[in-house]
Amino acid sequence: MPRYVECARELDSYLSARIPVIALRSIEQARAIRLVRELAGDPRRAAMPFWIHTRATGLRDMRTHAPVNDDRSITGAMDYATTQFTNRSQANFVFVDPDNLSEDTQFTRHFAELGRLADSTAGSVILITDGQLWSGLQRLGMSTTLDLPDADEMYATISDFLTDNASTVDIGWSEQDAQRAANFLVGATSAEGVNLMATLAADGKLEPSDVVRLAQLKDRIFSDLAGLERIELKEADYSVGGLQNLRAWLERKRQWMFADARNKALRPPRGVLLVGVPGCGKSLSAKAIAAQWELPLYRLDLSSIMGQYVGQSEGRLRDALETADRIAPCVLWLDEIEKGLSGQNDSTGVTRRLIGQFLFWLQESKARVFLVATSNDISSLPPELLRKGRFDEIFFVDLPDDDDRADIIRLYHRRLIGGEPDERLVKELVVLSAGFAGSDIEAALHEVGVAVELPDGDAVDEDFIKANFTNTMPLSRTNPEQIEDIRTWGRERAVPAGKSSPPLPAVVAGAGRRVITLGG
């Protein structure tokens, strides 16, 4: 059932029961006012007067819009309501977004007195607000929440927009396109949905490709988000090479991410946990996924969420995840998840509460937020985070094998030095880079690129390039035990992100099975 219809039923029952104080919680004032006006127009209530007060228009008759008095203040409106409740029965007053109603103040006590007076004459005070009510006021009545439009209601909004603009806009959308657009706009208000559709149609046409643009336009509504950092993407800078298993899996998830899921019990893709050797591109995979899926990318920064007061960290995490749900569809990147959620050496219990909140969101959220979490030390993560169903899958990203290292060498040679490398040199560098991660290859060729730009850059030759590779000491050689532990865990407990191959006798041999290659 659409949320608007469900809320209308609750509010209708409160009005019929003559509840003296009714709180209608919503961040959409116009939509909430429209709902109350529709109920006030019911023939059953033809004899009941309805007045509404807003800061801009003052007190007016809700049906005729006629002003009641010249005093536009809320105090004047409350005085008028007092007079009406005293002299007649079944009067109704709607107050839109009054100032702070959550505290015990003279103002809220005045409203409470008004509610008790309304109760004595079967009247109702309807408060449209996006905040909480003081308990003394709340106990005088009932409350209901008008949530943001769901996919069904947003589809109706889109359909109305397309019908209204059919004569001026060349509409190339099918019903399926409109349904996909409705899914994308979940989390936006009705007004935001109309504004986004109008922006798309501003050039006089709507094409199927514009559906994906909705996600990008919707993203611009949100800014300065606590705990969330917007990552700007350049599509040409990020692509995934190798990782055949991961790429095929992601393509299936991409199709479901953009599918019409209305009226289905199936939830959208939840996300992926990438574990593996440091420097092999796990973190950059989040950018690659967002770029290829044409979705905004946000980084969840757990360090900025931590607060010094009791409950502050949990509140910030809840706000960040709720905001991510509103932004959806999007890709949410949680880098090195073990640093924020390991729970080691935490005597305060904050980390355990954050883990519980995070797990609840992973389990219950139905928003199209695709989580990409990375980890170098998965052994420190709580086991409940790794239970099947939290993430859609756990993939292991290993050191690059010979073929993948050759691709990475060509890529960074073109980007950092310029031009295509000689294939004979590539073969020699592949041997010299045994045990290298992609970041090690980038570092070696970056030094070469810097040398080329210096005044004596003409002296850079193949021997200089090979010397840089020889002098680069990868983590697989400086800390082979750590790397072998990571690889052992990944081979046994995670899905390989790339092609399968027999286990290697030694890490420094350099032959791996999978890698993320960056390029464009």
Image: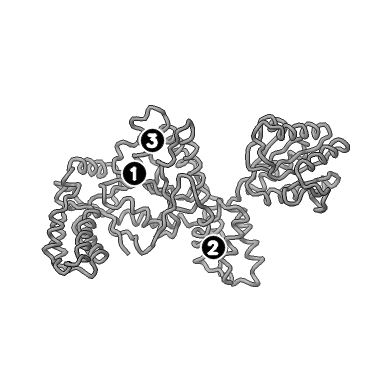
Vertical comparison of 353 with 434: above or below: above
Vertical comparison of 359 with 31: above or below: above
Real-space Cα separation, disc 3 to disc 2, in angstroms: 38 Å
Q: In the drawing, does residue 69 fall left or right of residue 218?
A: right
Q: For mark 3, what is the residue?
A: 384
Q: Element type at marker 1?
A: loop
Q: For mark 2, what is the residue?
A: 177
Q: Element type at marker 3?
A: helix
Which of disc 2 and disc 3 is earlier in sequence? 2
Vertical comparison of 472 with 424: above or below: above
The picture places residue 318, in percent across and down from the top left corner, at 49, 40
* Label 1 CA crowd tier, 10 Å (few <14, some 14–19, many 20+): some
Nearest the viewer among 356 and 134 is 134
The picture places residue 196, in percent across and down from the top left corner, at 57, 60
Q: Residue furthest left?
A: 463
Q: Element type at marker 2?
A: helix
Amino acid type, mark 3? Glu
Q: Is residue 288 visible?
A: yes
Real-space Cα separation, disc 3 to disc 1, in angstroms: 17 Å
Amino acid type, mark 1? Glu
Q: Is residue 41 visible?
A: no
Quarter holding residue 253: bottom left
Q: Nearer the viewer, mark 2 or mark 1?
A: 1
* Label 2 CA crowd tier, 10 Å (few <14, some 14–19, many 20+): some
Q: For mark 1, what is the residue?
A: 336
The picture places residue 34, in percent across and down from the top left corner, at 71, 51
Quarter holding residue 234: bottom left
Q: How many marks?
A: 3
Which label is found at residue 71? none
